[in-house]
Image (tube, grey):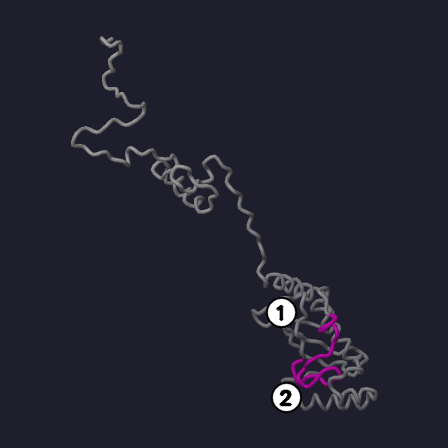
Amino acid sequence: MSASGAFPAAAGTSSSKAGAPAPAASGQSVNKRCVRARPLHTREHRSPDRRKRGRAEEKRGRARCGLCGRRKPFWRGEARPRRPAPRMTELPWRVPLRRLQSELMSLMMGGDAGISAFPDGDNIFQWTGTITGGAGTVYEGLTFKLSLKFPTGYPYEAPAVTFNPPSCFHPNVDQYGNICLDILKEKWSAVYNVRTILLSIQSLLGDPNLDSPLNGHAASLWPNQADFKKALLKHKSSLPSGERRP
């Protein structure tokens, strides 16, 4: 204790506040970057993995650091936000693809007489169908080819079905092969399939709708089946050899 009653300062200690940096010796500069307190979330205090994760989370951060103003990463005392699960949506062509593959197998296993259809090569959205006229009709024994084109909205959208022109002489078929059939237009339903389409067209051959004909000449001859048969055979004989089928 000194004469004044005060204890002498301990060696190596400073009379300034505890924790304050010691003054620099004469001729030495103070490195302010070393003196300034750094927040714990700076990059120097994180591993590379946490550093990488922190950068991504800082972009989505909510709050900022009170010391440096940087955004706080969520892993520092906050719950990490949960991303919504990715919504798995099917590609638009997968639904009709599976549907057409199933219909092809059903058609091959069904064994319905007088109808058949197969895809054109590797394009499953375009088929070639074949129908034979029913027994007891003027079309008995005659075979006709059809083209079926399916949209990507199938089975909720109707396919485009036409006769390969000019291979059918019928009141409800025009010279381009277009068919007047309600289930291919406004009455189409997703419950219909290739089989029901072919059977409906086969039935239409023997029972046409004369109220809305597409071929007026054929509609006028239909009441007289003998005259209609002559016109039908004449039409078939005028076709190229590749289009003639018994």
The furthest residue to the right: 223
- Residue drawn at x 53%, y 43% as measured from the top left: 82
Question: In screen coordinates, is 105 left or right of 53?
Answer: right
- Nearer the N terminus, badge 2 or badge 1? 1
Secondary structure found at label 2: loop
Q: Is residue 179 magenta?
A: yes
Instruction: State how far apart marks 2 and 1 are (Cα).
Output: 31 Å
The segment highlighted magenta reads 163-187
Question: In screen coordinates, is 34 left or right of 169?
Answer: left
Residue marked by disc 2: 240
Residue 169: quarter of image: bottom right
Q: Does the magenta stretch include residue 93?
A: no
Q: Residue 151 carries which label?
A: 1
Magenta residues, dominant SS class? loop
Amino acid type at mark 2: Pro
> How far across and how far down the image is residue 117, in percent?
66, 71
- Residue drawn at x 63%, y 64% as measured from the top left: 96
Amino acid type at mark 1: Pro
Q: Which mark is residue 79?
A: none
> How far across and how far down the image is residue 172, in percent?
74, 82
Above or below — where is 149 with respect to 174?
above
Q: Along the line of sight, which residue is nearer the eye, 229 or 141? A: 229
Above or below — where is 31 with respect to 101?
above
Above or below — where is 125 with respect to 69?
below
Question: In screen coordinates, is 29 left or right of 51?
Answer: left
